[in-house]
Image: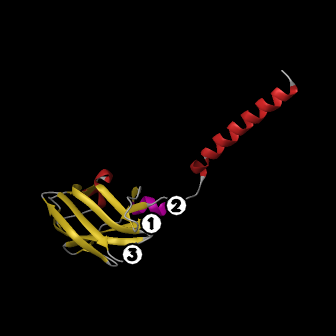
């Protein structure tokens, strides 16, 4: 093989390796991941609350959230009379909780929320209630940013999120 041909092959292989490695840099980046955080259940007397928060929301922050009916499940033997309280400028547009299934829609008309709590679920409790008495189906939850684009997000509980 001629010297010129070896040099050309070496350049092509080097370029292919460089492009291949650069395509994988996202695997090692420290870019923040948009996250929906399920808070800890707080109980005072016969009432409980559970805060939903977000962290590292892109493009102006979280501006809307929708959970289809059944996207939230709960133990009806321990939890009843669930209501949604919107926080920090969000408005409840719809909510329905009955028979252990729930869902809601909230939106913020003026701005997005990059990080922080946006909804509290309030409920009556019987006995000891923990986050394990609720179920959240990620595929039934949609988050929208301030540009009206869907947000690809991770979902975790507060213990796991703040322990990392």
Residue found 52% across the figure and 60% down from its top: 32
Dot 3 crowding, Cα within 10 Å, few <14, some 14–19, many 20+: some
Residue 101 percent coordinates (x, y): 18, 57
Q: Secondary structure at mark 3?
A: loop
Q: Residue at left 40%, top 63%?
A: 158
View extreme (left): residue: 99
The quadrant in which residue 90 appears is: bottom left
Residue 14 versus residue 62: which sits nearer the camera?
A: 14
Start and end of the magenta stretch? 157-164
Tell me residue 5's x, y (percent).
81, 27
The disc label shown at residue 32, or none? 2
Which residue position is annotated with label 3?
A: 111
Q: Residue 131's x, y, as percent?
A: 30, 60
Contact? badges 2 and 1 (CB < 8 Å):
yes
Question: How far across and down, in percent of the image, does residue 106 sit?
Answer: 27, 69
Compute the Cα span from label 2 to label 1: 9 Å
Task: Inspect the magenta stretch and tell me whether residue 77 lies in it.
Answer: no
Mark 3 vs mark 2, CA separation in Å? 20 Å
At a point 35% along the width and 61% down the height, the residue shown is 143
Q: Residue at x 37, y 58 (%)?
A: 150
The numbered mark, 3 or 2, whose residue comes first in the sequence reads 2
């Amino acid at each position: 093989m001629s010297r010129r041909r070896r040099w050309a092959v070496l350049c092509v292989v080097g370029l292919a390796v460089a492009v291949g490695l650069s395509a994988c840099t996202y695997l090692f980046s420290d870019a923040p991941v948009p996250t929906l955080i399920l808070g800890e259940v707080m109980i005072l007397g016969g009432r409980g609350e559970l805060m939903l928060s977000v962290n590292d929301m892109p493009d102006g922050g979280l501006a809307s959230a929708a959970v289809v009916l059944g996207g939230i499940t709960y133990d009806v033997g321990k939890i009843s009379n669930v209501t949604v309280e919107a926080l920090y400028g969000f408005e409840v547009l719809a909510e329905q909780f009955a028979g252990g299934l729930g869902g809601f829609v909230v939106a913020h008309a003026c701005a997005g929320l990059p990080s922080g709590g946006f909804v509290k679920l309030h409920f009556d409790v019987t006995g000891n209630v923990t986050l394990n008495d609720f179920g959240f189906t990620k595929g039934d939850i949609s988050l929208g940013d301030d540009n009206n684009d869907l947000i690809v997000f991770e979902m975790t509980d507060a213990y796991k999120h703040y322990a990392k």
